[in-house]
Amino acid sequence: MTRRVIDLPVLVLNRRWQPVAVFDVATAITTVCRDMGWVLHPETHALHDFEAWAALDVPSAPVIPTSSRGVPAPEVIVLRHYEALPSRRVPLNRRNLARRDGERCQYCGQEGELTVDHVVPRSKGGPTTWENCVAACGPCNRRKADRTPREAGLRLRTRPGRPTWTPRFTVPAEQVRPSWRPFVAASEQVAV
Ligand SMILES: [Zn+2]
């Protein structure tokens, strides 16, 4: 399957050169034309505004056909003003719950194999939310069973809530282009 040049993926870095998104070439060009970003040269890593970039000869880049002469397709752009990381929600799963809870059972404090405990049990209408789920060891979870902590004589060590960390931006491994590798860390080159 051949893709049109304007549909090719472009890695978007914030002004600290951290990856924050993937645009297509058309959107990346629009961003640079509006002076919201620079094109990053895939070999020299120099930054160019649109005029300068359009005048360059970049042998490795496919060319966007235009009415006059072709414009090299950018592979990486850098946003001029944006320096935040994208706000992405941490998915609620056993691994992230254990991480939020410091890899410890929230009833007895034991480390080790942890399960997901619904503080208000599901059988009593307790939802699967960050506020109602904690990491618990098997014995505490079994002891608590279908009861609230109070009914089971257990005490939560912390008040559960949404985690405070921001998940890192990830690019599916098969999408990572060679010119992106200096900016996308090895752990981010893994499909999620
Ligand atoms: Zn425990």
Image: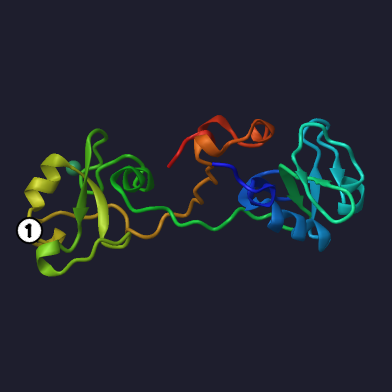
Q: Is mark 1 within 8 Å of ligand 1?
A: no
Question: Can you give x and y, in whole percent of width and height, for residue 169 in the image?
Answer: 55, 46
State the image coordinates of residue 160 (x, y, percent, origin top left). 32, 58
Ligand 1 is located in which of the four quadrants?
top left
Name the spot of residue 91 as percent of width and height, x first. Answer: 38, 53
Determine which quarter of the picture holds residue 177.
top right
Q: How is the image coloured?
A: rainbow
- Between 27 and 104, the one lying in front of the other is 27
Residue at the spot x=34%, y=47% of the render?
A: 101
Please indicate, yes or no, whether residue 16 appears anywhere in the rendered image. no
Side of 125 where 101 appears, left or right: right
Indicate the position of residue 92 as horizontal and vertical percent values.
34, 53
Q: Nearer the viewer, residue 105 or 185?
A: 185
Q: Quadrant of the C terminus?
A: top left
Q: How crowded is the residue under tag 1: few (<14 C-alpha within 10 Å), some, or many (20+)?
A: some
Quadrant for the N terminus in the image: top right
- Front residue of 164 and 70: 70
- The reply, left or right, for residue 42 in relation to residue 85 is right
For the point 85% across and 56% down, which residue is it? 67
Q: Secondary structure at mark 1?
A: loop
What residue sits right under mark 1 in the picture? Answer: 146
Question: Is residue 146 left or right of 44 when viewed as pictured?
Answer: left
Residue 119 can be seen, yes or no: yes
Q: Is residue 159 above or below residue 5?
A: below
Q: Relative to 124, is 85 on the left or the right?
A: right
Name which residue lies at 50% across and 56% down: 88
Count of numbered tags: 1
Residue placed farthest to the bottom in the image?
Answer: 125
Q: Nearer the viewer, residue 68 or 47?
A: 68
Name which residue type carries label 1: Asp
